[in-house]
Amino acid sequence: MISRRLPTILPDMTFEESLEVTKIHSIAGILSAHTPLISQRPFRHPHHTISGISLVGGGKIPKPGEISLAHFGVLYFDELPEFNKNTLETLRGPLEDKEITISRVNASITYPCNFMFIASMNPCPCGYYGSKEKPCSCTPDQIKKYIGKISGPLLDRIDLHIEVSPVKFDNFDNSKNTTDSKTIKERVNSARKIQQERYKNIGIFSNSELTPKLIEKYCILDTESKKILNAAFSSLGLSARAYSRILKVARTIADLDNSENIKVHHLTEAIQYRSLDRKYWGN
Amino acid sequence: MLSIIKSMSLLGLNGYLISVEVDVSAGIPCFEIVGLPDTSIKESKERVQTAIRNSNIQILSKKIIVNLAPANIRKEGSMFDLPMAVGVLIATKNIKNKQINNILENTIFIGELSLDGTLNKISGILPVCIEAKKMGIKQIVLPQENAKEASIISGLKILPVKTLQDVISYLNNDLEIKPEETSQNSSPDLINYDIDFSDVKGQENVKRAMEISAAGRTQLPFNRFSR
């Protein structure tokens, strides 16, 4: 339910982006008669029985798959471990390259797939492993098998990991103020503007596109932060990819804070989003 | 007699020009389609012949050859029904217009035919229009249902038609088709989501993570404890 709301806080698409999304949907033949031009960011949520071909695209003359239909939008997988393992692994390339080339006898076609990937899952078959409220009733083997469906490399390509606890009864009180999409969107927009301004001379638009060299230039840490990152790196057993992702996320948090440099609390928040996979996957 | 009609096909995200060449001659009556058509195109011949007959035009038994050039790329889809029908009608002199070559030079025909001559919606019209405009084509004749989608593109005359009969009348100068007006008005400020983050109670850490990923275009998964 909450993931469905992500498009409401994403910046509006430009006309060129809309046109490209509309083109892909037009080719797939799923454009509705009422919306000649898609101006809302797409939100695709395929069921977990989806096959690899319908996810990445295919056919005699290849048609776009779900990942391309989610171009410039959001691709959401509910119940991640229920997906076929091979299907999940097909995402590895597209998540990095932002495009997919499908080769068949008749044609070899490249479709763009620059999407945001969101997934949700239970930590074990019964749903309570690691929970503070209820004991888990699964055997270690069951848990291992369940979360083992998600491979390390795929996990590594995901920037933020969070734990969601059940909603407390107090939270249902309507009088409490919760931030609405408009306010969050304004913050997101201003953070994106900062990024665009910073990268305007090097041809990229957001922190997620930073290359290792650019990370060195734009994600500068002070001595204390360096010490923390060093400690986290060895204690969490992070990979090189995870390391650069932490820095990118820290850079984004600093941008949201309208801060020019990455401060300690930005970095620690970013590390926290990275520690969950170590807790469950333990490597 | 030979007639050449311009149409478009799709390869990935881009459209490319297809010349539908129709030759009608004396000989053993047949209707052949060549130029690497797939099954959906081979079936066109039945739709084209029946749609023409149901538009009250009798075509005497002739040898009809249709070529889809360039002939080395495999084609699929039902969008060549209309150009084939128009080609047959011109080659059999059922459409008479002195300016016909001038019209054909600057026009793309695209659409699927029903047996009664009605034009059906096809997919992928937007990339076709973009490519047509790039090539300097002036107008495109397409099914009524596709007109809205095509109208995003400015600088291309979009002629929506309902039936094959309308196309015949138009080419015979008996009917004026009102071009679809271009509409670039679906500007982003019209977006109205009927869902909002304020509907979600609690879960502040999730909202925060979503905000960060939205700001940095990053990926995120989450675990949850619930059934």
Image (cartoon, coloured by chain):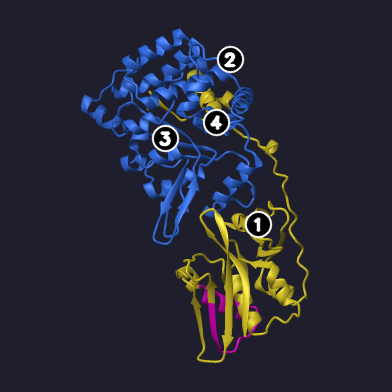
Kindly check if marks 1 and 4 are in contact, taking CB atoms under 8 A apart as contact.
no
Magenta span: B44-66
The answer to the question of whether label 2 and label 4 lie on touching residues, with beta carbons closer than 8 A, is no
Residue at the disc numbered 1: B134
Residue at 50 percent across and 80 percent down: it is: B32
**Can you give x and y, in whole percent of width and height, for residue B107 in the image?**
68, 67
* Quarter of the figure that contains the N terminus of chain B: bottom right
Secondary structure of residue under mark 4: helix
Confirm whether residue A2 shows in the render: no
Q: Position of residue A111 (x, y in %)?
A: 49, 48
Residue B23 location (% of width, % of height): 58, 82
Disc 2 and disc 3: Cα gap in Å? Answer: 35 Å
- The residue carrying mark 2 is A259
The residue carrying pointer 1 sits among few (fewer than 14), some (14 to 19) or many (20 or more) residues within 10 Å by Cα, namely: few
**First reached walking from the N terminus: tag 2 or tag 3:** 3
Tint of chain B: yellow
Q: Which chain is blue?
A: A
Look at mark 4 in the image and give the residue it sits on: A5
Q: Quadrant of residue A202?
A: top right
Kindly report which numbered mark, 2 or 3, lies closer to the viewer in this rendering.
Answer: 2
Instruction: Look at label 1 and name its amino acid.
Output: Lys
Say whether residue B20 is left or right of residue B174.
left
